[in-house]
Image: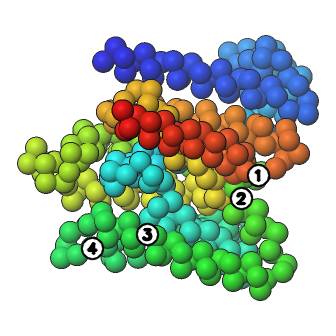
Amino acid sequence: MLRWRATVTYLILLLFLSLIITLAIGPVYISPTEILRVLCWKIGILNSPPRKVYVNIILQLRLPRILLGILIGASLSVSGTVMQGLFRNPMASPYVIGVSSGATLGAAIAMNMLPFIIGIYTIPVIAFLGGLFTLILVYNIARVKGRLRTDTLLLAGIAVSYFFSAIISIFVWIVSQERHQIVLWLMGGLWGAEWIKVDVIAPLTFISLAVTYMFAKDLNAMLLGEETAQSLGTNVELTKKTLLVTSALMISASVSFSGMIGFVGLIVPHVMRLLVGPDHRILIPSSALAGGIFLAWSDTLARVLMEIPVGVITAISGVPFFIYLLKKRRSVQSL
């Protein structure tokens, strides 16, 4: 218990420190003292208003983007943790069940065919619906005699993901007008961050995280196998269905607002599992905090380096570390 509290406390402090530092970094440097003044003035602690230019930069440009990145990073990391636990496969990622491909296909359709229906929110809304449609499709394919088989779910997710990816490639090939926008979506980015997006994704993220944490003990039991978990009193089918739905909701919401950001949900759970162990009661909140920190820093680096897609940064930083993890795991197994 003390270890759990210490780990979460350190990560919360690191998250707050990262928030202040990333708010300071940009074309216009703003000192941490000035940032704290703006934040304290915003919540009513200080009466004297700070400089208006700092207020606009922090509250209208940087803060919503950083908060959106933290929420998406937390969602992807926890989704990856859940997928690795459900499939008992450390190579599983949030995108393994195909929901992200469905959301991306929905975005591609919205970019080319439906830009006039909902205005600027056409893309995230249709992308979210595309992700949910994919979840229903994969779920019905994987369900056998009323039971949800994880091996069939994995194969169905991969098959649907490849199918939708092929359709997306067709869109990119035949549509020249929106090709650049689709490619940017596939790379992932937080360029269009604004407060309304934070307001939409925040409650969904917190509710999904809370529900996921409620099943942490059941997820621990399922690491021993479904039959063993069932004998220990775990409702295996309810656990799988609930965690699958909550993870899919987080993935759909994340992809609908940021596009495809890879490696966050694969690398962060690995790192936190090495640091805090496999107990999901500790691993889930730790992964959420670490994922938020990782994506906040990755996006800060992306916007400093000529506004390149943040998915490029996460891939560049994630691939070498992932290779290191594979080599370390192989060396441990050879002992």
Local SS, label 3:
helix
Residue 171 percent across, percent down from the top left: 71, 81
User: Which residue is labeled 1 in the image?
Assistant: 309
User: Which residue is labeled 2 in the image?
Assistant: 187
User: Which residue is labeled 4 in the image?
Assistant: 143
Snapshot quadrant of residue 42: top right
User: Which residue is labeled 3 in the image?
Assistant: 157
Q: Callout 1, which amino acid?
A: Pro
Question: Tags 3 and 4 in contact by the CB under 8 Å rule?
Answer: no
Local SS, label 4:
strand
Please give the name of the residue rendered at 84% of the width and 47% of the height, measured from the top-left corner: 307
Q: Callout 4, which amino acid?
A: Arg
Give the Cα separation between the discs numbered 1 and 4: 37 Å
154 left or right, relative to 17 = left
Asked whether residue 50 appears in the rendered view, the answer is yes
Q: Earlier in the sequence, mark 2 or mark 1?
A: 2
Question: Tags 2 and 4 in contact by the CB under 8 Å rule?
Answer: no
Please give the name of the residue rendered at 44% of the width and 31% of the height, measured from the top-left corner: 274
Could you say which disc has been placed on residue 140 in the image? none
Please give the name of the residue rendered at 51% of the width and 18% of the height, measured from the top-left corner: 10
Residue found at the far left of this picture:
231
116 up-or-down from 319: above or below: below
